[in-house]
Amino acid sequence: MKEKFIKPVSVHDVDEDQLAALFRLFRNFYNEVDFDQFSSDFREKDGVFIMWSDDSLPMGFSTFRVDEFELPSGTIRTIFSGDTIIDRDHWGNQILAFSWIREAGVIKGRTPFTPLYWFLIVKGHRTYRYLPVFSKCYYPCPDLATPTDIKKIMDHLATTHFGECYDPGTGIIRFPESKGHLKPTYAAIPKNHMEIPEVRFFLEQNPGYSEGDELVCMTELTEDNLKPLAARIFRKGMQ
């Protein structure tokens, strides 16, 4: 199978009309969101993948930011995922996911000997399920306790980004007021999804997801830690 990809663009190359169109798509899925907050969060990222329709309407997008941290254990790099939305008519389209993985390979290839982690905060079970689909070991997960060294990194990253809103005891980010939570239609979990262990685990870890609570998650991005399809795409980006 030949995968299709789109290249990310700098968030600074997205004009205000395009940004407004992205917000309209975002607003279809979330309550308690406003354009100013959305714009501020968007401009704080480095890049964005955007799927455009033939009539120049966004079908989906995903933002990201690359950071470098000096920790007692050494230097690490992180890809921090921001807002990710796919129009419901295009659920199942993997272009954004495949493009993201390839770009992660590009980023890894620039500093191949520096550990690279995917850091994300999750307030929906569909997003959480990307972790087991593409990664072998990810945290938190149903089958493995989070290693102490990984937990320290997660706590450091979450505290750096979100300060006192992060509770290291629960791994949850809770804002004084919701910065956006899924509309009930999308927060509701289909009965057949409740049979999936990862979905049940997500609900145990983040029972307040429907009010906007976010679960801190992380996985290391290496060929060995990615499942075969993801590893192949990642390797393509590194070349």
Image (cartoon, rainbow, N blue to C red):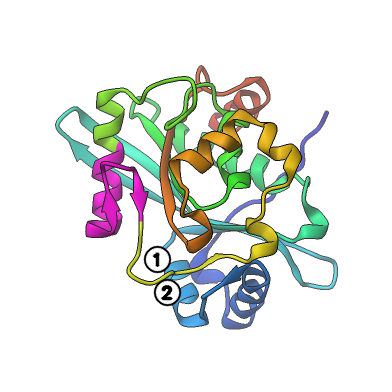
- Relative to residue 91, is residue 188 drawn left or right? left
Query: Would residue 92 be found to the left or right of residue 36 on screen?
Result: right
Above or below, 203 relative to 8: above
Residue 140, which numbered label? none
Q: Position of residue 211 (x, y in %)?
A: 48, 62
Classify 10 Å Cα crowding around label 1: few (below 14), some (14-19), many (20 and above): some
> At numbered mark 2, what does the secondary structure look like: helix, strand or loop?
helix
At x 35% / y 25%, what residue is drawn? 113
> What quarter of the picture does the N terminus occupy?
top right
Where does the magenta region start and end? 154-173
Instruction: Give the residue drawn at x 43%, y 53%.
Output: 214
| Residue found at the very far left of the displayed protein | 72
Helix, strand or loop at label 1? It is: loop
Give the side of residue 53 with respect to residue 220, left or right: right
Q: Residue at x 68, y 71 (%)?
A: 28
| Residue 38 percent coordinates (x, y) | 49, 73
Q: Nearer the viewer, residue 104 or 125?
A: 125
**Quadrant of the image containing the C terminus:** top right
The location of residue 61, given as percent across then percent down, is: 63, 59
* Label 2 close to label 1 by CB (< 8 Å): yes
Magenta stretch, main secondary structure, is helix
Q: Is residue 53 magenta?
A: no
Q: Which residue is mark 2?
A: 40
User: Vertical placement of 121 versus 34: above or below?
Assistant: above
- Please tell me how many numbered marks the rendered image carries: 2
Task: Please name the residue that numbered disc 1 is placed on.
Answer: 44
